[in-house]
Image (cartoon, rainbow, N blue to C red):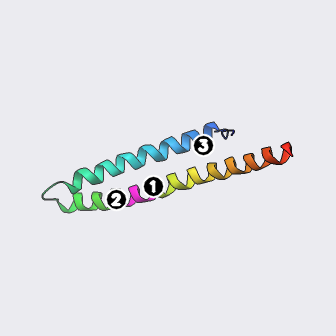
Amino acid sequence: MKTPKLSPAFKLVFSTVLSLTILSGGTSLWLASQLKLSEYQVRVLENSTATWQTGVGAIFGLLGSKATDLLEAEEEENGQEE
């Protein structure tokens, strides 16, 4: 089975999305563990939670696109062997 080629652009986008997702998820967890939040902290919590959820969706989308590339490359490889 061949691994798909990862372009530098894909690596940059994926690492950026992953970093922002981890950062916003950590921020959400930290703020959610606080006993009392100010109005501004509540807004940051809401925004970081939305960013985390969006980031998780983006990560699955990016990985899904590479899975599609892998399946297409495997089909081409199997088609050439016959």
Question: How many badges with numbers are in the image?
Answer: 3
Q: Nearer the viewer, mark 3 or mark 1?
A: 1
Q: Quadrant of residue 12?
A: top right
- Which three-letter amino acid code belongs to the residue tagged 1? Val
Q: Nearer the viewer, residue 62 or 50?
A: 62
Judging by the rendered image, the residue that carries numbered circle 1 is: 56
Q: Is residue 32 above or below residue 9?
A: below
The CA distance from mark 3 to mark 1 is 16 Å
Question: Quadrant where the N terminus lies?
Answer: top right
Q: Position of residue 51 (x, y in %)?
A: 40, 57
Instruction: Label 2, secondary structure: give it.
Output: helix
The CA distance from mark 1 to mark 2 is 11 Å
- Which three-letter amino acid code belongs to the residue tagged 3? Phe
**What segment carries the magenta color?**
50-54
Judging by the rendered image, the residue that carries numbered circle 3 is: 10
- Which three-letter amino acid code belongs to the residue tagged 2? Thr
Q: Nearer the viewer, residue 23 or 71?
A: 71
Instruction: Label 1, secondary structure: give it.
Output: helix
Judging by the rendered image, the residue that carries numbered circle 2 is: 49
What number is the disc on residue 48? none
Q: State whether the magenta stretch is mostly helix, strand or loop.
A: helix
Instruction: Label 3, secondary structure: give it.
Output: helix
